Image: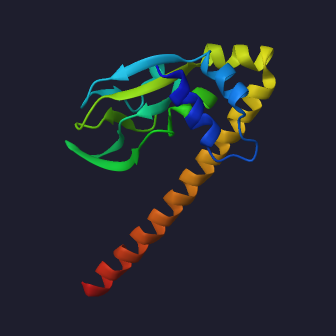
Amino acid sequence: MSIHMAVELLTAAASIAPFTEEEATALVRHMHPYTIPAGERFLIAEEQADNDFMMLILSGEVLVESHIAEGQTLTINVLHAGNWVGELALLDGSPRQADCRASDDGDVRCAIISRREFLSLLETEPYLIAKLTLLLANNISSALRDMHQKMCRYAEIRNAIRTEL
C-alpha cells in the first residue's frame, strides 16, 4: 500500500473537519493493503459474514452492481480513488446491499480498515474516528443526494414513457 497515496486521498477529501497530514498518517497505520484483481467480485450483497471492514480505494475502478432480474445486473455506481466501499456495513453491521467488483480494466488497490481496528481507534484515538465518521457522513450524504437526483430523473423518464403510450 502506498501510505503516501492514502494520506494524500484522506487529506484531500471533502469534510467539515478535514484530516491533517499527521492525522491521516496515524489512521493509515491502522489500515491494511489489499489488491483486487481486475474483474473480481469482492463484495456480495446480503452476505452477513463479510460486513466487518471498509476500504479506501487507492487506485482502479470499482463497479457497484445490483441484481434487478434473474441473470441481469445493473451498475448503479462507479467508484474511483478516494471513494470508500463498505462503510455502511462496517458502521451498522447490516448485510451488504450491493455487489462490488473490480473493473475489467485493471486491478483495484485499496486500504482496508476492519471494524476491530475502527473500534480500537475509537478507544485510543477518538478524534481520528470522529474525523473519519464526519468524512463518511459527508460521503453518505453525497450518495443520498445523487440517488435522489437519479430517482427524480427515473420518474421523469417513466412519466414521459407513460405519456407516449
* Residue 119 relative to residue 153: left or right: right
| Residue 22 image-quadrant placement | top right
Q: Nearer the viewer, residue 156 or 20?
A: 20
Visible residue check, residue 94: no
Query: Whole-percent x and y of residue 44?
Result: 37, 29
In the rendered image, the residue lying farthest to the left is 71
* Residue 75 relative to residue 22: left or right: left
Visible residue check, residue 133: yes
Residue drawn at x 66%, y 40% is 135
Q: Nearer the viewer, residue 92 or 126?
A: 126
Query: Whole-percent x and y of residue 55?
Result: 50, 28
Query: Whole-percent x and y of residue 31?
Result: 56, 18
Instruction: Check the image and report above or below for 149 versus 39.
Output: below
| Residue 19 image-quadrant placement | top right
Residue drawn at x 35%, y 74% is 158
* Residue 155 relative to residue 163: left or right: right
Q: Nearer the viewer, residue 118 or 108?
A: 108
| Residue 24 image-quadrant placement | top right
Residue drawn at x 61%, y 35% is 10
Query: Whole-percent x and y of residue 21?
Result: 68, 30
Instruction: Check the image and report above or below for 58 versus 65.
Output: above
Residue drawn at x 42%, y 42% is 80
